[in-house]
Image (cartoon, rainbow, N blue to C red):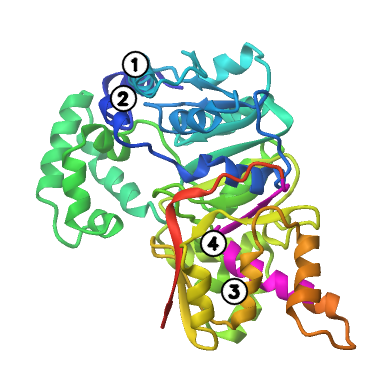
Amino acid sequence: MSQKVRELYEQFPYPLRDPQEEKDRLLMPPLDTLSRVNHYCFGGTKVIDASFRALVAGGGTGDAMIWLAEQLRDVGGSVTYLEPSEASTRVARARAEARGLENVIYVNATISEFAASKPDRFDYINCAGVLHHLEDPQEGLRDLASVLKPDGAMGVMVYGEHGRLAVTEWRKMIEPLLNNKDLSEQLAMTRKLLGSLPEDNMLLKMGGGPGFIKGLLENDPEIVDLLLHPVECAYDVHGVYDFAASADLHVAAFTGFFGFGGTGKAHYAIGNLVRDPALLRELSAMPLRDQQAFCERYSGAMPLHAFYLTRDDRAQAAEMLPDGDLAPYFFVKPTPSFFDDLVALAGQPVLIEDGSGNAVDLTGGPDLARLLAVFDGNNTVADLVRILRDDILDKQPIDMNSIAINTLGAVWALFHKFDWMLASRPDGWQKAESERQLTVRKQ
C-alpha cells in the first residue's frame, strides 16, 4: 500500500459512517451473508460454529466486520478486522461497541504485514474494494491466499472495467489539474466541477441522474474514493478469472454487493439478457466465463464485480440441483398467504416477486404449491424426489423417477435464479434473509 493511500484513509475514513446509527439499523452486505457463503463456497456443508474464523482484510469503517460479527455472535465465531488506517479503525470500533460486539479482534496493519506474521488460517476472508487500490493487487491476493485454510473461501469485490468507464474518463479529464494540489484542494476543485455538471455527462448516466451527484456532494469520503484515489485499477470478467488464477484460486460464483439483500449473479446469466431462442442457444454453448464476459459488455452497467473464490472449481456445481443429501430451503421466505395464493391462481399466468425488482413469471398448477410447501430445509433433495414422484405426480408405467428429478431441477433453477432458494445440510446453517419476502400475484 502506497503512502498516499495510507494518508487518504487517515484523512477520509471510508465509507462515511456514524456509529450512533448502529442503534437503529444493521447494514448487511450480501457478499458476506453466511448462508450465501456456505452455499456457493462450501457446497452447503460448512459447520459454522465457535471454531469459524473470518478475516476482513482492509475493513475500512466496518461494514463487513459488523455484519459478519453479528452473524457469528450467537455461535461463538470470531472476526479479525485488519485495517492500516487508525482513523477508520476508530469508527469501526465505535460501531462494534455500539452493538455490543465482543467477538472482533483488531489488527492495525497492511495485508502484506499481516500475512508475513503467519497468523492461524481463516475459514472465510472478506476483501471488498481493497485489492484494486494496491500497488500490486496480485501480490495482495496471494498474501490473502497464504492465510486461507485449504478448504477456505474468499469474498472479493473489485472495480469493473466496462461499467466504470465514466469514472475512468473523469480521472483522465482532471489528471492535468491535480498537479501541485494537496488532497483538500483537489476535493474543493472536484466539488466545483460536480456542482455544475453538464446534463449529458457520463457520471450522471452511470449514477442514475442528479440524485447521485447530490449524494456525492454530501459525502466527501465518497468523492475522494470514487474520483480522486491515487491508486486504482479495474477488471473485466476475463480479468477477474485471470486475477483469481494468479493465486491458484477459482471463481465459484459472482454475487451481489449493493442493496439490503439483492443478488447480482443474475446480471451474469445469458438467459436474463438475451431473449431470441436461436441466439440464446448459440451463446449458451460458449464456456461460462465467455458467457459472463458477453453479459458484462452487453449490459455495460457493471461498475464492480463481487465474487467468491475457492481453491476447488465450484462454478458449475453451485447452479445445479444440489446433491441428494442436501436440503433446499427458502433463503427468501414466502409471505404467509403465498401458497394459498398460488393455489387460488393455479392455471393462470402469475408473477412471483421479492420486492427488490427481481421477479419471474410462470403458469403453475396446485401441484407447484404442494411441492414448494415441502421445501422446508429438512427434506433433502432425495426426499423431495420421492415426495414428488410418489405423492404429487400421477403414477404411470414410465420412469417417474427421471420425471421427478427433471421437474425438481426446473423448480430449483427458477427459485435459485435470484437466491430465493439455497441449500445446506438439513441440520446446517439455514439463516433466511429478513428484508425480502416472496409474493405471488396475477399478471
Rounded to the nearest angstrom, the CA distance separating label 1 from label 2 is 9 Å
- Identified by mark 1, the residue type is Arg
- Residue 275's place in the image compared with 25, above or below, is below
User: Where is mark 3, residue-wise?
Assistant: 369
Secondary element type, mark 3: helix
The spot of residue 101 in percent (x, y) is: 45, 21
User: Where is mark 4, residue-wise?
Assistant: 268
**Is residue 411 on the magenta stretch?**
yes
Rounded to the nearest angstrom, the CA distance separating label 2 from label 3 is 49 Å
Q: Which one is nearer the viewer's eye here, 244 or 442?
A: 442
Q: Nearer the viewer, mark 1 or mark 2?
A: 1
Looking at the rendering, the stretch of residues picked out in magenta corresponds to: 404-426
Please report whichever mark, 2 or 3, sits nearer to the chain's N-terminal start. 2
Marks 2 and 1: in contact by CB < 8 Å? yes
Q: Is residue 248 visible?
A: yes
Rounded to the nearest angstrom, the CA distance separating label 4 from label 2 is 32 Å
Q: Nearer the viewer, mark 4 or mark 1?
A: 1
Marks 2 and 4: in contact by CB < 8 Å? no
